[in-house]
Structures are given as C-alpha cells and as structure tokens.
Image: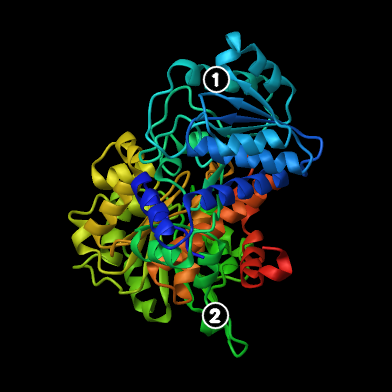
Amino acid sequence: MTVKVVTVAEMQALEGASESAGVSTDTLMENAGLACAHSTRQRMGGAAGRRIVVLVGPGNNGADGLVLARHLARWGADVFCYIVRGRPADDPKMTDALAYGIAVHDAADDDGLSNLGDLLRRCDSVVDAILGAGRYRPLDGLVGDVTSLVNEIRSGRPALPVIAVDLPTGVNPDTGDADPRTIIADETLALCHPKYGIANFPGAGFAGRITVLGIGLPAEVSAAANADLPTEWMNSESARALLPARPLTAHKGTFGHLLIVAGSRNFVGAAVLAARGAHRAGAGLVTLAAPESVYRVAASRLTETIHLPLPEDADGRIDPSAADVIRQRIDNFSALAVGCGMGWSTGTTTLMARLLLRGGDAPLLPVVIDADGLNNLSRCLNWEYRLRASAVLTPHPGEMATLTGMSTPQVQTDRIGAASKSAADWRQTVLLKGAHSIVASPEGPGCILPFANPALAAGGTGDVLTGIIGGLMAQGLAPYDAARLGGFLHGTAAEQVRSESGSAGVIASDLLDRIPRIIAGLRNPEATGG
C-alpha cells in the first residue's frame, strides 16, 4: 500500500475524516497503541519478564503510550508508566492501565528525578510517549529535565533501546527542527503516516530507524490521502509495483542495453562499480565506454560487459573527441549513464556538452547523470535549458549546491524543497542523495527513501546507485520510476549489509550481490518472508 508523508494539519484532517466515516479517534488510539506494543515486543524478542519504562505525556501521544503499556503488561512484561506531565483527572486509558497492575510514577512526586533515574538504569527498554504530533514547543521545565536524563543515562547504556511513538519528543513534526534536549531514539514508530519532521534534518537524526504502522484508518480515507498528498514514503509495496516484467519468452535484448560513459585513470573502480550495478539490476546488455587506460583494467574485472575503449587526454580522462565515437553507436542503446569517475576538466566539460546538450547533436536516450558528470554539466552555460534528454540527476548536497548556487547548509535545511524546486526548474527527475534521499519529479510528485545509513558513507556506493538506475531505465522504466526503485534497492542492500557487518568497513561492492536477491524477494514476498 502507498504511504504518504503528512503535516500535523493533514493528519488531523485524516482523523476528522475517519470520525466522519465511523471510525472514532479513540478506536484509532487503541489501534495505534496495540500496533506499537506488537512492534515493541518484536524488537525485544518477547515481552514476558521484560522491564519496560513508558514515558507518558499529557495528550494523545501519552494515551497511545498507556494503551501500549496495557498490552505489554497483558503479555507478561513488567511495565512502569512514568507520567511526565499530568494526565486528565478522568482518564479511561489510565484506569485501564491500572487495572492491569501497571506501576505508575508521577514526575511531580519525584524529587530530583531520582526514581526515574533508578527505573532507567534497571529497565530493558524505554518508550517515549511524551509529546507527539501536536503543537510543537521547546522542551523546558520538567519535560526538558526528563528528556535530558533519558539521553544522559542512555549514553552510559548504549545497548538500551529507546523507542519513540510517532516521533521523538522535541522534534517539530512539520519542519524537523529539534530542541537540543530532544530524546535520541533507536526507532520511531510512525503512526499511519510519517511526519515531515522525521524525514527532515535535524529531526531525522533523532528518529533512528523509522517503522510505519497502520492504525486502522477507513479504506476510503486512506485512498483519498494517497491520491491527494504529494510526498510518498517509499516502501516494499511501491517498489514491487515498479519492477520491470521478466517474461519467460525474453532474451537479452528484451531487457535493454545500457551505455555507461565513465572512468578516468585515477578512478577505474567507479566505472567498474557502475557497470556491475547495472548488470545486477537486470539490464540485458551493458557497454562500458571508458578511456583506454581504464579499459585495460576494467576488461579483466567485467567479463560480462561489452567494452568500448575511448580516446583519452594526457591526464587519462576521456578526450572530447570521444563524443563522435559514442554518437556513431548511440542507436544501439536504450539508456545512458554518464559521469562516474570521469574527472573534471575543460575537456570533460566539452564532452558533456557534445553528448547531452542542444547544439551538440545530443542523443535523446534517457540518461542518469552522476558525480563528475554533474560537476562538468554545471560549467556549461544554461545547461538546464539545453539538456535534451529525459534525465535523472543524482547530486549529493555539495553537488546540488554547485548546480543551484545555494550553499550546502541551505540545501540541507530544506532537502525536500530544494529537490522539488530543482526538478521543476530543470524539468528533470532529481535524486538528492544523503540520509533519507529525496526523489523529485518535474511533474510534482516526489518520494522519500526510508534509509539513513552510515554504511553508505563510503566511496563507490553512488557509482553502484548510478548503475542500478541506468540498468532500470534500460529496461524501460521512466526516469522518476527508475530513480525511486533504484534508490530503494540500493538502500535496502545497504540495510542488509549493516545488519550483517555493522556500519564501519563497508565497501561499495558489498551491495552488489544483494540486489538480485532483493528483487527476487520483492517479486515473491511469501517465499522470502518479505
């Protein structure tokens, strides 16, 4: 099912529509608490005998926490509810929790928060249900003291899991602004729809892994939301719907022929990784057009790849005359990938202009442009008006700053806005890389990729992504669909690597062999448990 990202006002409108459709807010709250309890139990490997502290706030987020606490206690957990700010005097959720024998502690009666400190030092898990997607406010007074103590004790107990309900206390749900004392969560259980605050930074940096949980919105309300809201939170179901067909009668030509123009003497590996990414994404044929010095090394590494050696300059970069070599063969291909490890010089800038821009007899193949391809393109006058092909541009924040004239901090402050505006201005698909990469379409819709993974902070991972996207476009996917599916496959592979090996020491080639298995799992989730 498609999942969209929402503001507070949009979520409140959905809850109102649910009431009108006959599903009350109280029912949604019960559903949310139960879903969070199931997720918390699964994370802990069971509930029986586990000591769990639930931090409870005054509003609906606190009520969700009380419902969660009730179910965990029902399953045998030793649950302690700590009331950070007073609940209503007539609170049915509190009454139900007490009926299950849950111990309740009130911050108002806890001098110096000594009782809370003792609970946090002895518990197996902490659930943050203090402040959710209501009105944002700075963390002052007792609430700020509680969140500070949680972070302090957690720093001394790094294995202690902290789970946030809907979003960590201290994050602005609409903007991602965060109070310095915001609770640092390992996982955020986003209720029904992720809020923009946990997709934007700095808020996303406090959210940890984001898991989206259904809360039982009526089907017609969900359908309307999916139709009307602009930003998608990419998930397995959306990725599955985009996979290119693999008919039994297919042959290698069925799945397209990607031309990769990449590499230079100092960056041989970038070309190799891009080619391998395209193969693993299912392209039928892949040709690597690289300088002679790259070809001599790459040919021994890429036995399945077709090679097109190109003339090179004195520094081992592709010579501009290579544009003529490529243009003579361009009709043999179905998509193009340009830029990985190309280097940056007057000659490579001229090459990019001849290959891709009006006035240079440019091909009309769909193209993914990455890395040095973007840096070279930025030096071409009015490139955004002259780019002839339908393209996916994949800048990291620094490259986006170069392309737009913004500073990198400006790009990072509003990543969704920067990507969306650029896609509209350039009339091209933009994939802004980084934690929670943004994919923006020139037609307006966009999506957020649900991955914030330090394992991807390694040279060459972007080259793998370029190859995957190019391989998908070669198979006939439109640029926007190839970018969001390619980004999802790439991010999922990185998540698997991190779960097996940790986030340090990962190299780009670790991702490659996982891509076909991820595709197979998407096609047949029952067989893989996906």
Is residue 358 visible in the rendered image? The answer is yes
The residue positioned 49% from the left and 70% from the top of the image is 472
Task: Say which quarter of the image contains residue 236.
Answer: bottom right
Q: In which quarter of the image is the C terminus?
A: bottom right
User: Horizontally, is 49 left or right of 526 in the view?
Assistant: right
Secondary structure at numbered mark 2: loop
The furthest residue to the front:
90
Q: Where is residue 267 in the image (x, y as percent from the top left)?
A: 49, 49
Residue 146 image label: 1
Is residue 313 visible in the rendered image? The answer is no
Upstream in sequence: badge 2 or badge 1:
1
Secondary structure at numbered mark 1: helix
Residue 245 image label: 2
User: Horizontally, is 384 left or right of 370 in the view?
Assistant: left
The residue positioned 63% from the left and 48% from the top of the image is 34
User: Horizontally, is 489 left or right of 71 in the view?
Assistant: left
Instruction: Look at label 1 and name its amino acid.
Output: Val
Task: Say which quarter of the image contains residue 446.
Answer: bottom left
Instruction: Look at label 2 and name its amino acid.
Output: Ala
Label 2 with label 1: CB-CB less than 8 Å:
no
User: Horizontally, is 519 left or right of 325 in the view?
Assistant: right
Q: Identify whether 272 is placed above or below 203.
A: below
At label 1, counting other C-alpha atoms closer than 10 Å, the crowd grade (few under 14, some 14-19, many 20 or more) is: many
User: Looking at the image, which is closer to me, 382 or 111?
Assistant: 111
The residue positioned 73% from the left and 38% from the top of the image is 73
At label 2, counting other C-alpha atoms closer than 10 Å, the crowd grade (few under 14, some 14-19, many 20 or more) is: few
The residue positioned 51% from the left and 65% from the top of the image is 1
The furthest residue to the bottom:
249
Q: Position of residue 386 (x, y in %)?
A: 20, 63
User: Looking at the image, which is closer to me, 305 or 42?
Assistant: 42
User: Looking at the image, which is closer to me, 362 or 455?
Assistant: 455
